[in-house]
């Protein structure tokens, strides 16, 4: 068996339940972008904690287990939760790529392992999957199981170029896809063939500056234009905020009220940004 379950992360404390919790079929949410450092793991963790606070049963899967940021975040959180029962925990599964030298065997083993894992998680309301900033066999398979793919990107045309070729031609309307958009497209087809379901693709800006620059406006304009052509939804996302960097060691998020940080206006605004993401997912 290729995946290992972290048993210390199985504490599901669902005592703080928001009565407004919406009943819905299980949703698999994949954070993906083959560029590293765009905020996939950080935002995945924040989404997970938002869902737990609403009373949902959440499983997390770290397909980027070699780097293991989400796994480390959850391990840190598990330690903090030992002294604080208000710190709600997901059930966590780090998974590793098959070590086979044959690509064919590796793909088959990865698929079997991953589908078996997903089938075993049918008691959860949400499965949140973090993927690496590279194009691995397991990452592609994880994308093909998504109901929603969330792609955070930084406020730069270099980031856009890695998703969609951002050429002057494209500014005037024609679209050239680069590899990440192609991966999503391929996995949308795989999903449709497997069970006739569709994948909702959301691209959001992360770590945006507070200043309204021309660059930012242009990026937003192009993303809005491309969203219809390439079949993604564009949402404005999250500003650059120190709080996102500070809480990793304690495993906390800006939603954990017991955070030693005092809430300031920036934190309140960040919570609002998170709410907007939940609304986009039709959860809030
Ligand atoms: N909105 C934000 N504001 C400030 N820093 C952020 C924000 N989102 C993520 N970060 C920081 O950016 C870095 C990369 O984030 P990470 O979640 O590890 O990205 P990825 O998983 O895509 O590689 C980390 O140092 C993280 O703390
Ligand atoms: Mg990561």
Image: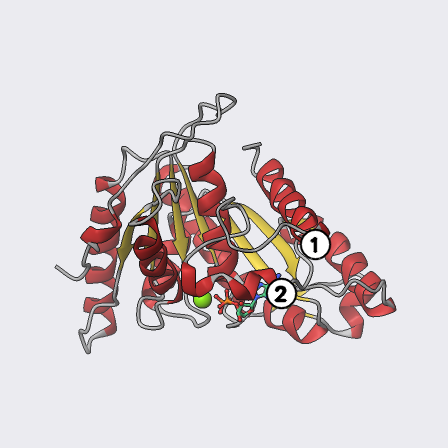
Q: Residue at x 46, y 57 (%)?
A: 186
**Where 42 sits versus 283, above or below?**
below
Could you say which is closer to the camera, residue 33 or residue 126?
126
Residue 35 at x, y percent in the picture: 53, 72
**Closer-to-camera residue (270/134):** 270
> What residue would you read off at disc 1?
266
Q: Residue at x 20, y 75 (%)?
A: 102
| Farthest residue, direction left | 1
From the viewer's perspective, is residue 10 above or below residue 168?
above
Lower sequence index among marks 2 and 1: 2
Image x and y of residue 262, in percent: 61, 52
Image side of residue 112 versus residue 83, left or right = left
Tell me the SS state at disc 2.
Answer: loop
Q: Nearer the viewer, residue 121 or 264?
A: 264
- Callout 1 environment at 10 Å: few (<14), some (14 to 19), or many (20+)? some
> Hey, which quadrant is residue 127 in on the image?
top left
In x, y percent, where is residue 1? 12, 59
Residue 134 in picture, x, y percent from top left: 44, 72
Q: Is mark 2 within 8 Å of ligand 1?
A: yes
Q: Secondary structure at mark 1?
A: helix
Locate residue 153: give its quadrant.
bottom right
Label ID, residue 242? 2
- Residue toward you, 10 or 22: 10
* Quadrant housing the C terminus: top right
- Mark 1 and mark 2 in contact (Cβ < 8 Å)? yes
Using the image, determine if residue 279 lies above or below residue 100: above
Instruction: Say how many tags the image has.
Output: 2
Residue shown at 43% from the left, 27% from the top: 17
Question: Does the rendering let one see residue 253?
Answer: yes
């Amino acid at each position: 068996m290729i995946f290992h379950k972290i048993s210390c992360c199985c504490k599901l404390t669902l005592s703080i339940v928001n009565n407004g919790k919406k009943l819905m079929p299980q949703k698999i949410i994949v954070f993906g972008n083959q560029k590293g450092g765009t905020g996939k793991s950080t935002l995945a963790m924040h989404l997970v904690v938002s869902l737990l606070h609403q009373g949902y049963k959440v499983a997390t899967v770290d397909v980027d287990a070699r780097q293991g940021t989400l796994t480390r975040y959850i391990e840190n959180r598990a330690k903090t939760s030992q002294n604080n029962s208000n710190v709600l925990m997901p059930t966590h599964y780090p998974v590793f790529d098959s070590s086979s030298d044959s690509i064919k065997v590796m793909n088959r083993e990865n698929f079997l392992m991953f589908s078996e894992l997903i089938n075993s998680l049918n008691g959860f309301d949400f499965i949140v999957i973090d993927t690496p900033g590279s194009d691995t066999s397991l990452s592609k398979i994880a994308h093909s199981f998504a109901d929603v793919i969330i792609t955070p990107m930084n406020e730069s045309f270099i980031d856009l170029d890695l998703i969609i070729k951002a050429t002057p031609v494209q500014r005037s309307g024609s679209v050239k896809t680069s590899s990440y958009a192609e991966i999503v497209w391929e996995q949308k087809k795989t999903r449709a063939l497997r069970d006739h379901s569709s994948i909702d693709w959301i691209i959001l800006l992360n770590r945006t500056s507070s200043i309204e620059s021309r660059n930012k406006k242009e990026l937003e304009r192009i993303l809005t234009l491309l969203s219809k052509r390439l079949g993604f939804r564009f949402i404005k996302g999250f500003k650059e905020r120190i709080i996102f960097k500070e809480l990793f060691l304690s495993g906390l998020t800006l939603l954990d009220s017991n955070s030693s940080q005092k809430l300031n206006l920036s934190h309140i605004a960040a919570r609002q940004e998170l709410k907007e993401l939940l609304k986009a997912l039709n959860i809030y």
